[in-house]
Image: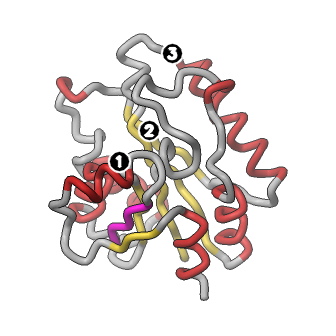
Amino acid sequence: MKLVILDRDGVINLDSDLFIKSPDEWIAIPKSLEAIAMLNQSGYHVVVSTNQSGLNRGLFDMDTLNAMHAKMHQELSNAGGNIDAIFFCPHTHSENCNCRKPKAGMLLEIADRFNINLKNVPMIGDSLRDLQAAVLAECIPVLVLTGKGIKTLDQGNLPPNTLIYDDLYSFVLDWIE
């Protein structure tokens, strides 16, 4: 099975320091949906792994998160693409769960559910915690410079062998060729 794992906010859609709290605030990054469609057309399954602490912070509820994801699925379908599954962590950092990135629990759950070894699976994110989780799960860490990506790059301390791309679209152009 060919698999790619994506963070959501800052990779697929625009991010905000104030959290994405409604479907109206969920706005796709230019060419991100086309990039996912290109992955699908090249035989890749695409899974989202996203921290969504806004749930436990009370910034939005499960119905609202589902509505955001329904909008993402619809816009992606209109672009000819599909996301096979969305895994999310509702916990805040202080809850110290195993599923919140930078821990690898969510990625290991993906490996278990899809019955796949993550060794050659790219995990694309815009934050250091995405990359750290990728390394712990033995994924290929990929940093995109959308969302918080430029800030993450400027702060340094990236895991060794991190691949860096301007955005999801440029990653896909390179990855599928």
Label 1 element class: helix
- Most foreground residue, 62 or 80: 80
> Quadrant of the image for the N terminus?
bottom right
Colour theme: secondary structure
Q: Quadrant of residue 162?
A: bottom left
The image shows residue 89 at horizontal and vertical percentages of 38, 35
- Sequence order check: which comes first, mark 3 or mark 1? 3
- Mark 2 and 3 residues: CB-CB less than 8 Å, in contact? no
Q: What residue type is labelled 3?
A: Phe
What amino acid is at disc 1? Met
Q: What element carries label 2?
A: strand
Q: Which percent across, then down, holds residue 6?
A: 48, 56
Corner quadrant of residue 160: bottom left
From the image, tell me which residue sits under label 1.
106
The numbered disc on residue 88 is: 2
Q: Is residue 136 left or right of residue 127?
A: left
Which residues, given as a range, are shown in magenta?
A: 140-144
Magenta residues, dominant SS class? strand
Foreground label between 2 and 3: 3
Question: Residue drawn at (38%, 78%), measured in percent from left and top?
Answer: 120
Chain-order first, disc 1 or disc 2: 2
Q: Residues within 10 Å of mark 3 (few under 14, many from 20)?
A: some
